[in-house]
Image: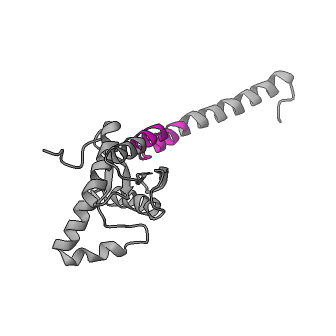
């Protein structure tokens, strides 16, 4: 026969609470490590993306070039873009695609273009998707040993000039240099 005394009901309720609390505590260690398995990635802050773009535009302007500059994150998503006064409309797309290519393939686009010319088997890289552009002016953004994005410049009269302006952007944010300094 079940106990109907008021102190028995409290004891049963207390036992149920103790069982629930014990189950919760036993299951807790299994939920915490799951977050430890998630990858940790550095993100390029918007302020740094803007600073890199402005430095690139300033470097090209100083040399008389009207360009566009774009910065993408590690996944190739546009973080920031600016088109200098007087820059051609095509420079918007070219700068974004160069940034995308450099971030995605983790190499300077000039280096990639030269590799394709030396090894024709790599020609297929041009056709990976419609965002890839194998022209100089795109550099991966590497900070603290990690590629966090890409910067692309389009519109200067030569890939080496686009590269130099993109490098000015990297220099402004303390990223690892990707273009040798001029001698």
**Residue name at image x 31 percent, y 55 percent:** 162
Q: Residue furthest left?
A: 183
Instruction: Give the quarter of the figure containing the C terminus.
Output: top left
In the displayed structure image, the side of residue 25 where residue 72 appears, left or right: left
Q: Nearer the viewer, residue 84 or 154?
A: 84
Q: Classify residue 144 by image quadrant.
A: top left
**Residue name at image x 41 percent, y 72 percent:** 129
x and y, in percent, of residue 96 in the image: 43, 58
Q: Classify residue 42 by image quadrant.
A: top left
Q: Nearer the viewer, residue 109 or 54?
A: 54
x and y, in percent, of residue 21 in the image: 63, 32
In the displayed structure image, the side of residue 10 where residue 45 appears, left or right: left
- State the extent of the magenta-drawn residues as a range: 28-52
Instruction: Give the quarter of the figure containing the N terminus.
Output: top right
In the displayed structure image, the side of residue 168 where residue 115 appears, left or right: left
The answer, for residue 158, to whether it is visible in the render is yes
In the displayed structure image, the side of residue 4 where residue 16 appears, left or right: left
In the image, is residue 59 part of the stretch drawn in magenta? Answer: no
The answer, for residue 43, to whether it is visible in the render is no
Q: Nearer the viewer, residue 159 or 127?
A: 159
In the image, is residue 46 part of the stretch drawn in magenta? Answer: yes
């Amino acid at each position: 026969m079940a106990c109907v005394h008021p102190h028995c009901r409290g004891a049963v309720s207390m036992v149920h609470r103790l069982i629930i609390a014990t189950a919760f505590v036993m299951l807790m260690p299994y939920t915490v490590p799951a977050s430890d398995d998630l990858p940790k990635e550095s993100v390029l802050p918007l302020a740094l993306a803007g600073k890199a773009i402005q430095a690139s535009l300033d470097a090209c302007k100083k040399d008389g070039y009207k360009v566009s500059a774009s910065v993408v994150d590690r996944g190739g998503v546009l973080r920031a873009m600016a088109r200098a006064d007087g820059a051609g409309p095509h420079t918007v797309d070219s700068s974004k695609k160069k940034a995308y290519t450099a971030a995605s393939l983790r190499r300077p686009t000039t280096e990639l273009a030269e590799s394709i010319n030396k090894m024709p088997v790599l020609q297929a890289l041009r056709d990976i998707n419609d965002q890839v552009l194998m022209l100089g002016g795109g550099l991966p953004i590497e900070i603290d040993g990690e590629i966090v994005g890409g910067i692309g410049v389009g519109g200067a009269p030569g890939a080496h000039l686009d590269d130099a302006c993109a490098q000015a952007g990297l220099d402004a944010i303390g990223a690892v240099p990707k273009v040798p300094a001029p001698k």
